[in-house]
Amino acid sequence: MSEVPYKPEELLINTFAGLLDGVGHVAVGALSPIPGCAALLAQELAKQKGRDVQVSIIHGDANNPFTDGGRELFDCAGQGRIGAFFLGGAQIDGEANINLLGVGEYPDLKKRFPGSFGSAYVYFVIPKVILFAPEHSARVLVEKVDFISAPGTSPPNVHRPGGPKALVTGKCCMTFDAAAKRFTLVSVHPGVTVEEVRDNTGFDFDLINDVGTTLEPDGERLALLRGAIGPKIAKTYPDFAARVFGQG
């Protein structure tokens, strides 16, 4: 256990930041405060090593280099100038297909969501897409999505430089193997068991030989989060910063 108490959001931020190591440009979509913090943390950690990491948070004006929103983001991604992006879904299945449209048989959906927007495009062109499911349940992590907004894999004859590399949930962290079309559980968050993950996941997955515990943020990392990242993310997500980091 970490010697310094931390919040669940800080564990997730720290986990995401570790997955961003070595990425030169991280883009984060709207309504994504946890991935946004992780990108800023990865930027700060890279700076300590003498490297530059560009962060683009497509929400508000702070940390947002784009003046035309999605169109500039898609153009940048298509040119290969974005290394990592985050995607979620109302449903995610074992082949990393995501559903952002709705639940039920299309077109007679029982529940409709905002829509797919550019998810299929960025899923194909950004090299490292990290999936995020804060709610780890069989309702979200399903055997098969009701509608494929963006496919996790493509046939061999399809040019696809991008795709999913990992899935982080409220309970664990998994990696994804596109060739096998399967997730592999690599760590469970503190206090969570492998059996609990399996019981709450609607699809089958593999295990590494020794599933570990997700790395907890230490005192130095928490000080960095609360002292440097908190004020930065407060410019974009003030309510989140106030709740998690105590930033006014």
Image (cartoon, helix red, strand yellow):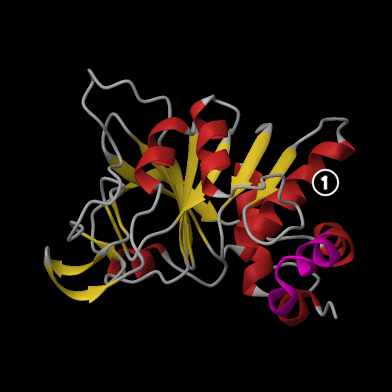
95 w.r.t. 81: above or below:
below
- Residue 51 drawn at (x, y percent): 82, 30
- Residue 213 drawn at (x, y percent): 56, 58
Q: Is residue 231 magenta?
A: yes
32 w.r.t. 43: above or below:
below
Q: Is residue 5 visible?
A: no
Instruction: Identify which residue is drawn at 71% across, 50% down.
Output: 64
- Horizontal side of 139 relative to 42 (left or right) equals left
Residue furthest to the front: 68
Instruction: Identify which residue is drawn at 26% across, 38% down.
Output: 181
Magenta residue span: 229-240
- Residue 99 drawn at (x, y percent): 28, 58
71 w.r.t. 142: above or below:
above
137 w.r.t. 27: above or below:
below
Locate the N terminus by quadrant.
bottom right
Instruction: Identify which residue is drawn at 58% across, 50% down.
Output: 69
Among the 4 quarters of the image, the one containing residue 91:
bottom left
- Residue 207 drawn at (x, y percent): 36, 47
Q: Nearer the viewer, residue 138 or 227?
A: 227
Locate the C terminus by quadrant.
bottom right
Looking at the picture, which amino acid does disc 1 mark? Glu
Residue for badge 1: 44
